[in-house]
């Protein structure tokens, strides 16, 4: 029991550091989109790597602002290069969140939640509605898809379901931020049409793959 308490204390301490202390220090350095843009440019050819790592960090470390990172990349690199880097960063970041939740979150959940309620939690997150909600949160810019990745990791949902949904879902958020950061208008009819088509197609894809994903 003492060892379990020690592990929980270490976990809570690390969470506080990652969720509040580190973001605070980074936000002091990059308090605006313009400062982040200037810093990325100063890295020269290494800026691509730095920017991708920054995108991963802004997904994993809460509450770093992924939106600011996305807009800055669109301004510096243009729509498509920034989109590719943001997409890769967002997918990798959400997968890290999922596996962190799987590795540590479930143990913490079982300490504070009764076993029968843990099973109810598993059943809730293994449903089609839960995965559709996760898809929406990841696809739309400004929504907390990164938080959802942690919570899905707490459940028994398989990585074989989480990863492909994450890959498809993050297309919308990554492209939208890169597109707007490059100076394009979110209200452009062509963009809105493509955005809507991909969004609806993604939802239909999750629905049609329901049996393959073993969703309730």
Image: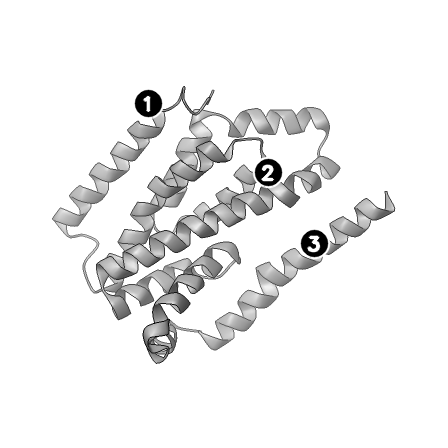
Q: Residues within 10 Å of mark 2 (few under 14, many from 20)?
A: many
Label 1 vs label 3, nearer the camera: 1
Q: CA distance from mark 2 to mark 3?
A: 16 Å
Quadrant of res 14: bottom right
Q: Residues within 10 Å of mark 3 (few under 14, many from 20)?
A: few
Q: Nearer the viewer, residue 121 or 11?
A: 11
Residue at the spot 44% in from the left edge and 74% down from the top edge: 30
Above or below: residue 118 compared with residue 142 = above
Left or right: where does residue 215 sit relative to residue 45? Answer: right
SS state under label 2 = helix
Q: CA distance from mark 1 to mark 2?
A: 25 Å
Q: Which x, y percent locates residue 156? A: 58, 31
Left or right: where does residue 209 sit relative to residue 117? Answer: left
Q: Which residue has dot 3 on it?
A: 12
Q: Locate the N terminus and report the quarter of the image it occupies.
A: top right
Q: Residue reaching furthest left? A: 190
Q: Can you tell which mark lies on residue 85?
A: none
């Amino acid at each position: 029991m003492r060892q379990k308490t020690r592990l929980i204390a270490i976990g809570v301490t690390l969470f506080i550091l990652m969720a509040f202390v580190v973001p605070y220090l980074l936000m002091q350095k990059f308090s605006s989109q313009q400062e982040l843009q200037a810093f990325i440019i100063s890295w020269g050819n290494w800026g691509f790597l730095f920017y991708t790592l920054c995108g991963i960090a802004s997904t994993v470390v809460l509450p770093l602002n992924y939106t600011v990172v996305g807009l800055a990349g669109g301004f510096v690199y243009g729509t498509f290069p920034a989109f590719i880097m943001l997409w890769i960063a967002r997918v990798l970041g959400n997968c890290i969140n999922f596996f962190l939740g799987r590795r540590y979150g479930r143990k913490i959940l079982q300490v504070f939640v009764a076993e029968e309620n843990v099973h109810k939690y598993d059943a809730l997150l293994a449903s089609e509605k839960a995965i559709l909600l996760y898809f929406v949160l990841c696809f739309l810019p400004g929504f907390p898809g990164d938080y959802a990745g942690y919570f899905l990791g707490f459940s028994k949902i398989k990585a074989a379901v989480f990863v492909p949904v994450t890959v498809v879902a993050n297309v919308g958020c990554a492209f939208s931020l890169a597109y707007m950061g490059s100076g394009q208008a979110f209200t452009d009819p062509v963009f809105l049409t493509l955005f809507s088509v991909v969004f609806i197609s993604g939802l239909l894809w999750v629905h049609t793959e329901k049996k393959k994903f073993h969703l309730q």
